[in-house]
Amino acid sequence: MREVQSNNIPIVNTKKSRWRNFLLFLAILGPGIITANVDNDAGGIAVYSLAGAEMGYRLLWSLVPILVALIVIQEMVARMGAVTGKGLADLIRENYGVKATFYIMLFLVVTNLGNTMAEFSGIAASSEIFGISRYISVPISAFLVWLLVIKGTYKSVEKIFLVACFFYIAYIISGFIAKPPWKEVLINSIQPSFQINSTYLYMLIGLVGTSIAPWMQFYLQASIVEKGITIKEYKHSRVDVIVGCFIMYVVAFFIIIACAATIHRAGVKVESVAEAARALQPLAGKYASWLFAFGLLNASIFAASILPLSTVYYVCEGMGWEKGIDKSFEEAPFFYILYTSFIVIGALIVLVPKFPLLTVMFLSQVLNGVLLPFILIYILLLINNKHIMGEYINSKMYNIFSWIVVFVMITFTIMMLVTTFV
């Protein structure tokens, strides 16, 4: 009897421990998955759609190194938030001064204003596919997005965001409906191809810029801090980050193959996500078209909540102002005033007739790619500072890979600019 009991006790304890760890993971779940999914916003979907429509499957290979790079970068940022209890902008201001913080803030505000316009443009385009005027859908969506953050708490807002993540499954279904040649898809997913021309480079930089956006690093670290995640819970938070990155990869993968298998194969030219969604109807059926449009609507509303938040977090951290969804207007007036301003400006500009939204959307993604290396340099300097991170600094392998990412991004940016001018 004693031998049976002694053999069973570790099993019971292990089961309890696994169950406890799973419950703790569910409690920690949120920042990583939400941040990575918002990455598949209207601007991101536009870039993925155009990549598939114009290049076919040729850029699928780039999603693998992008995925690995995203996991490494997001892990560093989440670790910094858990160890220091401070946002990324706070750390940059404290260690590198107000001037550096200001210039990054200026670029980030301009880029994210363009991104926010892109989200409301996505709402307008997708709603019009369903027969709803943008002059109805955009103001209503803007009000609901504003109300969610202004009146909600961090926990309630996070739950709604996690539910929104589920609806990205629409793009996966669209990809299967398109019936791509899976053998060709597999070959292009693992076999790199590279071209020296401005169109290819712009698209590649756009893919990297929209997949690893600067705003993500600020939002993720701010979310880790606001949720109160410490280094004790960090192993669960790291799983949250990795799962979120894989979901981002899968969604981007299926958007590209849905457009490549239909629009590119048919030789149809499209210039926007709305045109891509409409083009799918005669090529893959109305259900694929509706799913694509619904995915765009969900992603746009979702990101229209997050992108202004990420910017406001950065500005308030950089200026030393109070911030946070759990704080009242009296406690954090600048936080809510800035958030409201972003929503209002982004929504109003979309309603201006003949405004060049596609240009703004794509250039904002390219600007993300240009800005990213400089953000990564600050992240690497901070994460390797023993006074800040203590024993949780990067390993040598982490540093080698991270510096390679910075070098590659700077090289791509220079090549893009040179090719464009030539």
Image (spheres, grey):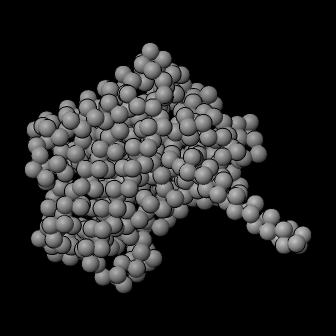
Name the spot of residue 283 as percent of width and height, x first: 15, 73
Residue shown at 29% from the left, 50% from the top = 298
Farthest top residue in view: 330
Quadrant where the C terminus sits is bottom left
Residue shown at 23% from the left, 48% from the top = 122
Name the spot of residue 138 as percent of width and height, x first: 19, 38
**Res. 303 in view:** yes
Name the spot of residue 142 as percent of width and height, x first: 25, 35
Residue shown at 60% from the left, 52% from the top = 23
Quadrant where the N terminus sits is bottom right
**Res. 403 in view:** no
Farthest right residue in view: 2
Q: Nearer the viewer, residue 339 or 377?
A: 339
Farthest bottom residue in view: 183
Q: Quadrant of residue 301?
A: top left
Residue shown at 30% from the left, 74% from the top = 176
Residue 253 vertical placement versus 367 (above, below): below
Residue 334 vertical placement versus 315 (above, below): above
Name the spot of residue 170 as percent of width and height, x first: 30, 62
333 on left or right of 270: right
Instruction: Count the marks.
Output: 0
Q: Nearer the viewer, residue 138 or 104?
A: 138
Q: Nearer the viewer, residue 277 or 393?
A: 277
245 on left or right of 303: right
Residue 65 vertical placement versus 88 (above, below): below
